[in-house]
Image: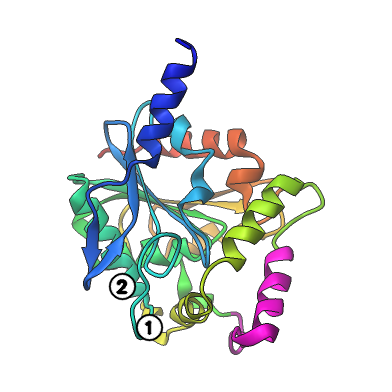
Amino acid sequence: MRRLLPALLFAIAFAAPLSAATVDGLKIHSSSVGSGPAIVFVHGWTCDSSSWEQQVPAFSKKYQVITLDLPGHGQSALPKDGKLSMDLFARAVEAVRAEAKADKIVLVGHSMGAPVIRQYAHMFPSHVAGLVAVDGPLDMRGFPPPNFSAPPPLAGAEGLRTRETMIRSMFVPTTSPAIQDHVLKMMLGAPEATASGAMAAMFDPAIRWSEPIKSPAFAVVAGTCQVPDVHKTREVLPTFEATQVAGTGHFLMMEKPAEFNQQLTAFLDQIKF
């Protein structure tokens, strides 16, 4: 029983939300574990905060670890009109930061979470100690690619099949069945309005600004992706660095958590909060 108690207490702490933050009247689900300098983990398109299950216990030993469900995702409310935007996502992160009483934060964004934290740094630069993109873009100048003119339709039965095809393409042969099941259930469980609205937010021309972000920035990409051109990216992120976790699909932080956590730790060790 004594051995089970610490694990039980951690589970309770991880499950306990902060007193509910809100943005535009929408309740934002979030959790905070640990103490010290703050890290905010931001999930991707049609995902939720469970994406970071392998990071929360590792980093909460030294840091205040904050996770949240973006509007329309997980347990957070969806706007009645279904409209989502990078500004709304960034303001939701800010509401959670303020609720947690953190000052300077390192933001870690997976997939769509990368443009979310980029937008946050644009809107709330005084609170940013560093940015970490996890298989997602911090430099939006080349997004979307020239041969990708518009997102696919995501409504109705055909849209659901499209979503499933997209999700399965994110895996590699070594992605475990357990991770695949988790991701499929999480992403296909998101409302249709969230899938369409969040995808539209990523393609919004309003987020194509290119003003430099001076905060330390780092990218960790999957084995299936190309490492960003560091010198070119430094035109907008002057301190940018990048690395790759080989042999992983899109959910690298779940597939090789020890290696990912090591890379993130090395970046955090350089940050002045």
Q: Residue at x 17, y 45 (%)?
A: 101
Residue 118, above or below 149: above
Sort mark 2 into few (<14), some (14-19) or many (20+) by Cα contacts within 10 Å.
Answer: many
Q: Secondary structure at mark 1?
A: loop
Does the magenta-highlighted stretch encompass residue 42? no
Q: Secondary structure at mark 2?
A: helix
Residue 45, above or below 51: below
Q: Earlier in the sequence, mark 2 or mark 1?
A: 1
Q: Which residues are magenta?
A: 145-168
Tell me the quarter of the image containing the C terminus: top left
The type of residue carrying mark 2 is Leu
Q: Position of residue 110 (x, y in %)?
A: 51, 57
Foreground of the two, 21 or 127: 21
Q: Is residue 267 visible?
A: yes
Residue 31 location, quadrant? top left
The answer to whether 19 appears left or right of 269 in the picture is left
Circles 2 and 1, Cβ within 8 Å, touching? The answer is yes
Residue 99, above or below 89: above
What's the CA distance linking mark 2 and mark 1? Answer: 9 Å
- Which mark, residue 88? 2
The residue wearing badge 1 is: 83
